[in-house]
């Protein structure tokens, strides 16, 4: 029988961070993962550059049925703490929009940093190791039946992630373990995911594939000012990915394609100046002609501001600055960056990440019902929650 103090299911961001911290405390730690390499999702994130955290991390950047749950972990292991580790390893990084931090070279730098820390503190990592069954014994220990033989441990940490990107090996294992022990799991769905269009809109906007424009996209709860990208399936880009985590099926989105312009005022000024240019020319300074064509049509684009009534200018403005679109759905877990829902935070200690009902059972990272925005927030949750559990396992 293989005896460990701590077994961590999942060699991703939260699992490796937990392992490092537990190892620092002298715990005998084994990380098991069915994948053939550690940190697979880290390696492919951020286009291979890994958006590993953000300069500005706030609880408001997270979605959960218990919005207060993330506060403790985020305040005890902050973005500055993770940055200190990155700088200790002299990993070059840079800031992009909205405080997002990326590796200059490769996401491999982050994975190598984590694995180096694991080696330093005696953590064992077992790859290609799948779990058949988890049981709690009479003495309080956990017994895991794995493809590499049975493992017994005092503390079991579930860091198995969510359901997003199944080709990377995502499974529902973490949710099944929670349910096995009577812990509530909120329904899951894809988050930070492109949205698909209704058949008519899909056909109408298909010629725009590849066009990206700045916008403000809004639903009744949130607004995001980012780029929107037209795809052959529907809408993507940072603005759509952000709003997708809040969007509910059947709900319409409002999109302002000229977020920095008072278009109605501009058109009225053109009219007052006696502008004889067609709207196609006037608006072509601000938006791609193919996009204008799809939203306004030839008749509207042929109008001349000097000849337009207030109502016409108002309608033109609404088409471009309050474009209403009702998505058909999302592209699902296949392309989603995260999973919404998961293990109910009300059943877990926000200080230790330990189950309130099952001593010795911990949950960290994406398997919990905590989902961050696009921009390094989900990695920071992984680091913070993993660090917290690592202090107590």
Image: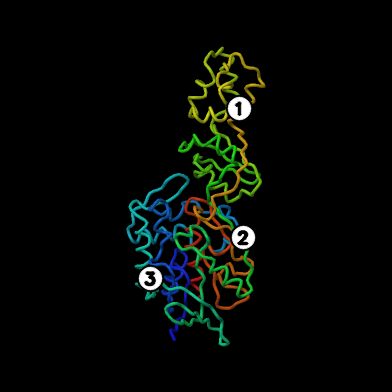
User: How far apart, in angstroms, are the residues tagged by discs 1 and 3?
Assistant: 57 Å
Residue 23, image x, y percentages: 42, 75
Residue 57, image x, y percentages: 51, 54
Query: Which quarter of the image is occupied by the N terminus?
Result: bottom left
Residue named by callout 1: 317
Residue named by callout 2: 68
In this rendering, the label closer to the viewer, 3 or 2: 3
Labels 3 and 2 touching (C-beta < 8 A): no
User: How far apart, in angstroms, are the residues tagged by discs 2 and 1?
Assistant: 40 Å
Residue 239, image x, y percentages: 53, 43
Q: How many numbered tags mark residues here?
A: 3
Secondary structure beneath label 3: helix
Secondary structure beneath label 1: helix
Choose the circle earlier in sequence order: 3 or 2. Answer: 2
Which residue corresponds to the image point at 48% horizontal and 71% vertical from the top-left?
9
- On residue 118, the disc is 3
Choose the circle earlier in sequence order: 1 or 3. Answer: 3
Mark 2, Cα crowd under 10 Å, few <14 / some 14-19 / many 20+, is some
Q: Vertically, is 150 above or below 159? A: below
Choose the circle earlier in sequence order: 2 or 1. Answer: 2
Q: Vertically, is 364 above or below 339? A: below
Q: Which one is nearer the viewer's eye here, 32 or 223?
A: 32
């Amino acid at each position: 029988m293989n005896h460990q103090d701590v077994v961590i299911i999942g060699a991703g961001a939260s699992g490796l961070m937990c392992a490092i911290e537990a190892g620092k405390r002298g715990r005998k730690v084994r990380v098991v993962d069915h994948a053939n390499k550690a940190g697979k999702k880290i390696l492919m994130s951020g286009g291979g550059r890994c958006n590993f955290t953000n300069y500005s991390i706030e609880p408001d950047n997270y979605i959960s049925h218990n919005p207060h749950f993330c506060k403790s972990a985020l305040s005890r292991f902050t973005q500055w703490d993770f940055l200190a580790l990155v700088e200790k390893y002299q990993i070059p990084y840079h800031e992009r929009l909205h405080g997002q931090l990326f590796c200059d070279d490769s996401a491999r730098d982050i994975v190598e940093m984590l694995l180096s820390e694991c080696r330093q503190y005696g953590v064992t990592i077992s790859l290609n190791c799948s779990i058949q069954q988890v049981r709690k014994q009479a003495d309080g220990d956990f017994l895991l039946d794995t493809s590499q033989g049975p493992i017994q441990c005092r503390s079991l940490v579930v860091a198995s992630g969510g359901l997003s990107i199944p080709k990377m090996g995502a499974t529902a294992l973490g949710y099944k373990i929670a349910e096995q022990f009577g812990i509530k799991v909120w329904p899951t769905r894809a988050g930070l995911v492109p949205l698909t269009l209704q058949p008519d809109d899909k056909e109408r906007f298909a010629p725009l594939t590849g066009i990206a424009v700045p916008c403000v996209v809004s639903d009744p709860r949130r607004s995001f000012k980012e780029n929107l990208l037209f795809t052959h399936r529907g809408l993507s880009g940072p603005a759509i990915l952000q709003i997708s985590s809040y969007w509910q099926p059947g709900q319409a989105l409002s999109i302002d394609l000229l977020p920095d312009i008072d278009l109605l005022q501009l058109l009225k000024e053109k009219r007052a100046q006696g502008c004889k240019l067609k709207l196609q020319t006037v608006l072509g300074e601000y938006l791609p002609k193919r996009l204008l064509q799809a939203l306004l049509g030839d008749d509207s684009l042929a109008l001349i501001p000097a000849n337009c009534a207030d109502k016409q200018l108002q309608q033109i403005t609404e088409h471009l600055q309050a474009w209403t679109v009702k998505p058909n759905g999302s592209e699902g877990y296949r392309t989603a960056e995260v999973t919404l829902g998961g293990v109910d935070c009300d059943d877990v200690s926000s200080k230790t990440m330990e189950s309130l009902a099952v001593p010795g059972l911990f949950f960290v990272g994406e398997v919990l019902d905590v989902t961050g925005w696009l921009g390094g927030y989900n990695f920071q949750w992984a680091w913070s929650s993993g660090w917290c559990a690592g202090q107590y396992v």
